[in-house]
Amino acid sequence: MFFLQPTIVSLVIEGRVVRLLVTKGRSVLSWAVVPFNPALVRAGVITRPQDMADIIRQATERVRFSGRLAATFPGVGVVSRVMTLPRGVTADLDTVVLHPVALAGWFGLFVTSINLLPVGQLDGGHVLYALRGRSSWLVPALLLGALVWLGTHGWPGWIIWAVIITVLVRVGHPPTEEDHVPLGRGRAIAAILTFVIFVLTFVAEPFRIGQ
């Protein structure tokens, strides 16, 4: 039945315009199109968030809606093209529907960064052990302190990972048969590149709660 169907508000930022569409089932209730200066968006990034917020506010005032908003960006196929809506809009914009490929890419990068934490028997810990051997205790200690700080100032989930890392440090890394053999130049470069990937994929606040 029509009155039982949810009202869906879709926001599309494409080219030089912001389009807002309010639908209920297969019926279009209202819509708005507001042009903006192309300089507000460069390479998939909103360069002037407050100005873009004003444009989106104009569109929301024209359709006069309340509730959640589904934001879509045509052509988004990789994580680097994902755009973040600015704050300061009167409507509730806390729900952003990402392209499935972008969502899968983000989750893959998040899991990769967790696995590359340089501690214990995570892949990052294996690489660190191969590079530094048993003298690599300082890096896990610094990582533990960093995660505790991030957990108290940002995402609380890092506190759980700090506890997990404490357990991994106490367990330690098992010795190998060739601990005395140093890494070759190629493998050492590969180890360094692995930590570069960790830095590039690590997000200090992967989830935001209560915003």
Image (spheres, rainbow, N blue to C red):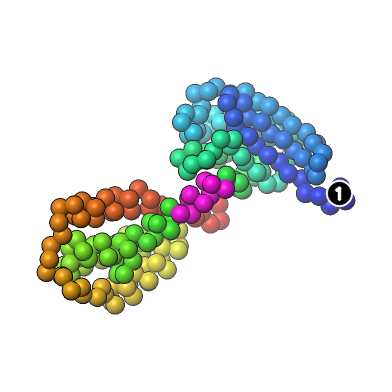
Residue farthest along the bottom direction in this orientation: 171
Question: Going by the image, does 150 lie left or right of 13?
Answer: left
The residue nearer to you, when weighing 189 against 144, is: 189
The residue drawn where x is 61% and y is 46% is 97
**Crowd band around label 1 with a 10 angstrom C-alpha radius: few (<14), some (14–19), many (20+):** few
Magenta stretch in the rendered image: 100-108
Give the answer, above or below, for where 81 lies relative to 101: above
- Can residue 144 be seen by looking at this rendering? no
The picture places residue 50, in percent across and down from the top left corner, at 53, 32
Tell me, yes or no, whether the highlighted magenta stretch contains residue 94.
no
The residue drawn where x is 45% and y is 62% is 156
Q: Which residue is mark 1?
A: 3
Numbered disc 1: secondary structure: helix
The residue nearer to you, when weighing 162 against 66, is: 162
Q: Quadrant of residue 11?
A: top right
Tell me, yes or no, whether the highlighted magenta stretch contains residue 106.
yes
- Can residue 106 be seen by looking at this rendering? yes
Residue type, numbered disc 1: Phe
